[in-house]
Amino acid sequence: MGLMSKILGGSGGSRRTGDYVELDAADLDVGASDAKLQIRIAKIGDKQDVIDIKDAVYEGDVVVADITRHTTKDRTMEHISDELKQVANEVGGDIVQKDEDQLIITPTGVSISRERL
C-alpha cells in the first residue's frame, strides 16, 4: 500500500480510528511543532461533547465532528448544531455539514469552500 493510500485510509467506505496511520512529521518534512492551527477530530454522542468542541474552536482549532449517532432531524442534533453555529459566528469562523455524518467547524479567519475538488 502506497503512502497516499495509507494517509487516506485505504480504499473508500466508512472510516474508523484504526484506519488512520500515525505519520512522523520528520518523514514528511513538516514542522509539526511550529503548527499554530490544529485539526481536531471529535465524536458527538451527547450535548456534553459540545463543550470540548467549542473550547477547541475558541482556541483556534478546526474541528471535524462525527455525528453518526444522530440523524440530522434529531432534536438534540438541532440544538447541538445551533450551538456550534453560534460559536462559528462568534469567532468569525465557519461551519458546514459534510454528508450525513460530519460537521466541520472552523475558527477565526478560516472558511470552508462549498465546492468539491
Image (cartoon, rainbow, N blue to C red):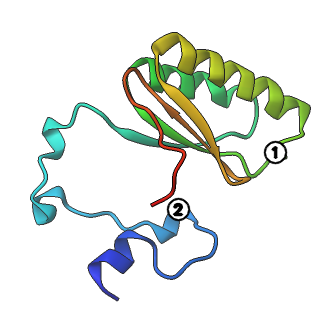
Position of 21 relative to 43 (above/below): below
Query: What is the x, y in percent for residue 102?
Result: 64, 48
Residue 27: quarter of image: bottom left
* Type of amino acid under label 2: Thr
- Secondary structure beneath label 1: loop
Observer-nearest of 4 and 20:
4
* First reached walking from the N terminus: tag 2 or tag 1: 2
Q: Is residue 74 left or right of residue 101?
A: right
* Residue pictured at 80% horizontal, 23% vertical: 79
The residue that mark 1 highlights is 70
Query: What is the x, y in percent for residue 8?
Result: 42, 70
Query: What is the x, y in percent for residue 90?
Result: 53, 10
The reply to whether the C-beta atoms of the residues labelled 2 and 1 are less than 8 Å apart is no
The residue furthest top is 90
Whole-angstrom CA distance, mark 2 to mark 1, is 19 Å
- Secondary structure beneath label 2: helix
Observer-nearest of 17 and 112:
112
Query: What is the x, y in percent for residue 59?
Result: 39, 20
* Type of amino acid under label 1: His
* Residue pictured at 89% horizontal, 38% vertical: 74
The residue that mark 2 highlights is 17
| Rendered-image quadrant of the N terminus | bottom left
Residue 117: quarter of image: bottom left
